[in-house]
Amino acid sequence: MLCEQVDIIIPVHNSERYLSDCLKSIESQEYGKINVIIINDGSRDGSEKIIKAYMHNSKFTVKYFAFRESKGVSFARNKGMELSSGEFITFVDSDDIILPNHIKTLVYNMSKDTSLSAIQILKKNVSIRSKSKARVLDLSNSFISVLSSKGIEGYVWNKLFRRELLDKYNIKFEKNIVMSEDLLFVCNYILNARGNMKVSSTQSYYYRTNNDSTTRDSSIEKAKIKSQFLVYTSIEKMISNNGLNPRAIKVFYEKYMLFLNYTLYKLDKNDQFCELDSLLKNFESKYLISFFMSGAITNKEKLGYLYRKIKRS
């Protein structure tokens, strides 16, 4: 029986509607050696009351830290990592649910030559256990899998990280990134750790879309686009001289191209538009054919690319 400690980091911001269900699912875990680290990111609702009741009754050790004002999910997760002490770290969002076998599956997939463990993503109601099959991915295929929109993706909440590697390479969430911060974190980890990723077909994490958090504010939309651009340019710097095979490099630029296509559709025409348009045309001259043949790009993404291209012309 494995006995490594797992620290579950849960950032909370005005989550009273979902938080009780999330914490109940944490409490149901079959894996016994768990520390729960809850970071209250300036909540103004009843979240703290729910947290304190949970702390009083939980079978696990619970650490709690509260910010007076909201600092954002990246800041909250970084604080959680500062408070961690276990061999492994994972993340759970406060509006999501995990099945009882979730942590156990992630830990059992870890071995000496595995730096990252992951499970498939489930975006519908969790009601039954799925039979687990696991596969091991090398560096390049791990990188491709987190860029892909199929199954694993670049989220942190369906993965288990080694804390010693996070500490060794000083891997943290970028505080000025408000969109795709997970993808940057995971790519940074993979490209530094350079080990295998073991992926289980178990679907034990129920990702719930919180419609309360959606917004149509144009300034927020632009901030998200700016963040994603920073993410792609940061990853581009990471992938030089790191042993990735040509296919992995190509998939990265195909995803970069997809992002630029979407961005140019959303932005008003300005100086940045011209700069990004030039960059997109450069990528299209090299990767357009492979983009439409790529297995890492979904058919929905390919059709969306064509639609936006036609609308812009």
Image: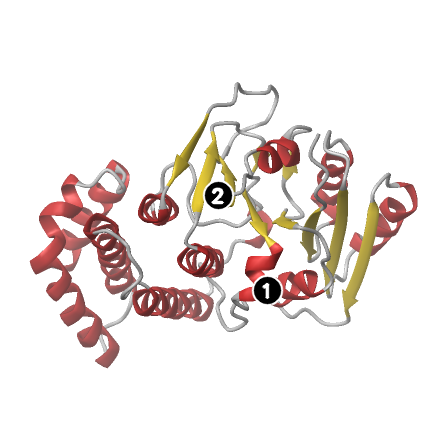
Q: Nearer the viewer, residue 137 or 294?
A: 137
Judging depth in this view, the residue of 231 and 44 nearest the camera is 231
> Is any atom of residue 198 visible in this view?
yes
In the rendered image, the quadrant that contains the C terminus is bottom left
> Is residue 202 positioned above or below 181 on the image?
above
Residue 95 percent coordinates (x, y): 65, 44
Q: Which mark is residue 109?
A: none
* 237 sits to left or right of 18: left
Residue 43 position by quadrant:
bottom right
Q: Which residue is mark 1?
A: 167
Q: Spot the residue most to the right.
A: 56
The answer to which of 166 and 19 lies nearer the viewer is: 166
- Residue 301 position in % (x across, y down): 26, 44
Q: Residues within 10 Å of mark 2 (few under 14, many from 20)?
A: few
Which residue corresponds to mark 2? 113
**Mark 2 to mark 1: distance in Å?**
18 Å
In percent of the image, x 26 and y 42: which residue is there?
297
